[in-house]
Image: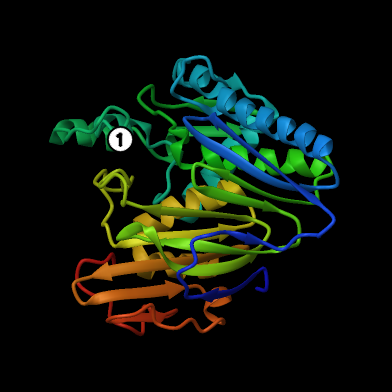
Amino acid sequence: MNTLLAATIGLIGTLSVCGDAHDVVVHRQVETMGTVLWMDLEVKDRAEGLRASEGAIRTVEAAEGRLSTWTAESELARFLATNAGEQVELTPLLALELEAARRLCEQTGGAFDPSVGALTRAWGLRSGGRTPSKLELERARAARGNELWQVQDGFASRKSPALLIDEGGFGKGAALDQAIAKLAEEGVRSATVNLGGQLAFLGDAERTVPIADPANRGFTALEIKVIGGSVATSANTERAGHLIDPRTGLPADDFGSVTVWAESALAADALSTGLFVLGPRSGLELAEELEGVEAVFIAESTSGRKVYMTSGLSKGSPSDVGGDRTTSNDPEGTELREGLNS
């Protein structure tokens, strides 16, 4: 596809945007959803940009009020507090977001699973980390999966009281989708929105997005050029072991990082987790099959670094990063070193 134009190797750590010389750029930065939201809006005048940015901020705050499970007051938390088997009417937006998360769980074969909350709790991922007992792990694994909950015609229910939905794998993306939609509604023609490191774009300008080196986030490993959509990266750089494979209940194999571009920010958010869990070989195969999705895997091993990318990116024929490193879009044809997911 031509939305993602190319991948190029470089050491430039800034995000560049092509805009109209007559526009002004309004920058906003606020703390929300436990992280930082910043926006660069290209608008005709500052008043327009401030009005639009306020609307976008309100939509992100509303997403937190709808999806956060850090509080008992959100709509999602209230649903999770109901009795098993009880039919709960959802707001249309939450119903759409949960339906999208369920579809992505199916598409990834459970490598991304929004109902991973029991495992998140078992590993203490919100409280500094711990190692669960074998029994705890078995119970947490049994309390997840699409078969244990449903969303249909605006109503949701759980079959198991132990099932917990964790918005951490899709909540930022859902908020970004709403922010971009609000900016478009307010007449903003071009914008870059960053929520906790995930990017979303409005407009038909070409952006150059740097991808961090998974071994050192202070350096850029490569760059991709995109038009619109959203870019999300998953890696264990900051917190080793925080990415759990829902299928096994164990930390996913730490091969490096995966960066996903998708037309939907919710999809990019969820798929960056799911494709990381699947690993370079299976993850690349799935990304190639999905419409409106591109992905870059940076795989580290004792023998060096390999970069694998979907065909929509690899047409750019990137060069080696340096050292004993190779680039390929065909991990089936190139031996993946011991320690990577099969």
Nearest the viewer among 80 and 47 is 47
Give the colour scheme of this rendering.
Answer: rainbow
Crowd tier of the residue under label 1, counting other residues whose Cα lies within 10 Å: few below 14, some 14–19, many 20 or above: many
Q: Position of residue 136 (x, y in %)?
A: 19, 30
Residue 153 seen in render: no
Residue found at x 82% / y 52%? 23
Q: Quadrant of residue 67?
A: top right
Image quarter in which the C terminus is found: bottom left
Q: Position of residue 333 (x, y in %)?
A: 36, 85
Nearest the viewer among 115 and 19 is 19
Q: Is residue 194 above or below residue 124?
A: below
Label 1 residue SS: helix
Q: Position of residue 196 (x, y in %)?
A: 49, 42
Direction from residue 152 to residue 311 in the image, left or right: left
Residue found at x 59% / y 48%? 265
Q: Quadrant of residue 164?
A: top left
Residue type, mark 1 in image: Leu
User: Mark 1 — residue?
Assistant: 119
Residue found at x 19% / y 32%? 130
Direction from residue 4 to residue 296 in the image, left or right: left
Q: Is residue 86 above or below residue 202?
A: above
